[in-house]
Image (tube, rainbow, N blue to C red):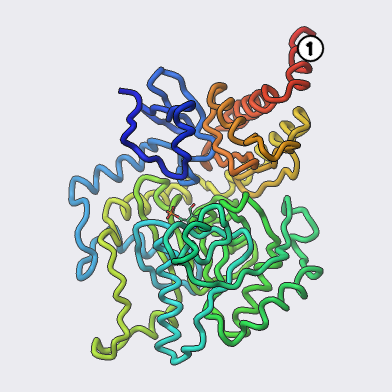
Amino acid sequence: MRYSKNIWHPCSQMKDYETFKPLHIVRASGCYLELANGKKIIDATSSWWCKSLGHQHPRLKAALLQQADRFEHVIFANTTNDKIIALSNKLTSLMPSLKKVFYAGDGSCAVEIAMKMSLHARKILQEPQRKKFITLSNAYHGETVGAMSVSDLGLYSEPYTAMLFDTVVISSIPYVSHQNAALWSNCDAYWEQIEKQLLPWAETATAILVEPILQGAGGMKIYSQDFLKRLRAWASLHHVHLIADEIMTGIGRTGKMLACEHAGIEPDFLCLGKGLTSGWMSFSAVLTMETIYDLFYDDYETGKSFLHSHTFSGHALGAAIAFEVLAIMEEEKLCERAVLLGAHMYESMLAVANETGQLTNVRGIGAMVAADLVSADPSRRLGYEVFQKAVDLGALLRPLGNTIYWLLPLNAEMGVVDELRGITIGAIASLVPSLRRRGARSEQE
Ligand SMILES: Cc1ncc(COP(=O)(O)O)c(C=O)c1O
């Protein structure tokens, strides 16, 4: 059987599946997915941004099997093991002040853990007035209620408004298309307007949440590192926590191990997921400072314990794989590799824009490049049409609305980018009659 009507797929209008059936995957390797009909297609967005080392990495498979041979998962309250100790040592060496790590099962939960820790710290500090969360426009932090509340994408959260809480949304974000942009290193022109929005909350905010440097679901938007630096300074000055949600940006995606490094800052809380296990396990982590941890450290009777208790916290298979991911990142210098790959991706997306004339706002950082389709007809789901054509031509290129982007594994071969460029041009061109004519002419020439 190639399709089951019993399944409700994520992030989908199921009616679409009547005319465009789910792709039936039988195998995957590196950047490629193999379909039941034998066709191989490029996984151009790394399976919702998590396959940072590609599919079926032999070392990650070996790490998984080796751990499975010993034990797969044991309750992580009151137990420990060699792998999680080794992993925790590595994670807490990523940033000098983030010395404590708490484990969770997925990205949304990691974000909520950081939020709970921030709020709980306020209770311990007897600062009950500090309960507001501040977030950025176009933010996305996940799908659970708290994570949705601090996100700014009505598309995902509007029907659930009744169960969300109010947050402060900061607008006028200084977006850039590239690190060479002047705004990247100086956002003076924007800061006054931003500070005006922040100031009323200086005494009542508990934390500011950011996707550092690169906002993913909000449309692959890149912002000024100077803005992040100023936000950190403002938060410190007013004793507001900074929560860096690096679920998507962390572990090399932006060309640095952590996107916060672009601004030379350290957050109070750092959330990691997705690429932490290169998508092998649902496994995430929250790193924080000793000063925060110490607030909770007391006799049980004082009621200060952080009693968050997910079944899969510290999953041993996830820990074994995450440890190996970090080893591979280091040995193969994959942050540097992401920068090289990204430069080629950026040039290639520019070529797609030039060739088709249908893309605007080409932007990129690390191994991510994006551009927006110029759509004259707002009723047309152009991004979705490009996605369907791209599958025919050989790539799973799931867009964000009309934003087309490539987010390949950090270790992808340059040739995959070339292939993707051809496929993207073909997919866009096939939808634009004038381009189709131009394509036909150049074939004859
Ligand atoms: C920045 C960010 N935070 C949180 C999440 C939620 O992660 P998960 O889907 O693992 O819950 C995502 C997922 O795309 C994300 O991009």
Which residue does the image show at 37% across and 52% down from the upper left?
322
Q: Is residue 101 left or right of residue 313?
A: right
| Quarter assignment of residue 367 | top right
Q: Residues within 10 Å of mark 1 (few under 14, many from 20)?
A: few
Say whether residue 35 is visible: yes
Tell me which amino acid carries mark 1.
Arg
Q: What residue is pinned by disc 1?
A: 441
Quick one: 313 or 440, which is closer to the camera? 440
User: In front: 160, or 430?
Assistant: 160
Picture quadrant where residue 125 is located: bottom left
Secondary structure type for disc 1: helix
Is any atom of residue 93 visible in this view?
no
Which residue is at the front of the view, 204 or 87?
A: 204
For residue 212, above or below residue 40: below
Q: Please, is residue 20 above or below residue 365 in the view? A: above
Judged left or right of residue 62, residue 126 is right
How many numbered marks, from 0 up? Answer: 1
Residue at the (56%, 42%) spot, across then down: 407
Q: Position of residue 344 (x, y in %)?
A: 67, 37
Which residue shows up at 78% across the image and 21% down it? 434
In the rendered image, residue 38, in percent from the top left (x then y), is placed at 41, 18
Looking at the picture, how far across and down is residue 129, in whole percent?
51, 88
Measuring 18% from the left and 51% from the top, which residue is drawn there?
A: 71
Report if the beta carbon of the residue with label 1 is closer than 8 angstroms to ligand 1: no
Front residue of this view, candidates 47 and 250: 47
Please identify the quadrant where the C terminus is shown. Answer: top right
Tell me the quarter of the picture where residue 205 sits. Answer: bottom right
Q: Position of residue 147 (x, y in %)?
A: 47, 63
**Position of the N terminus by quadrant:** top left
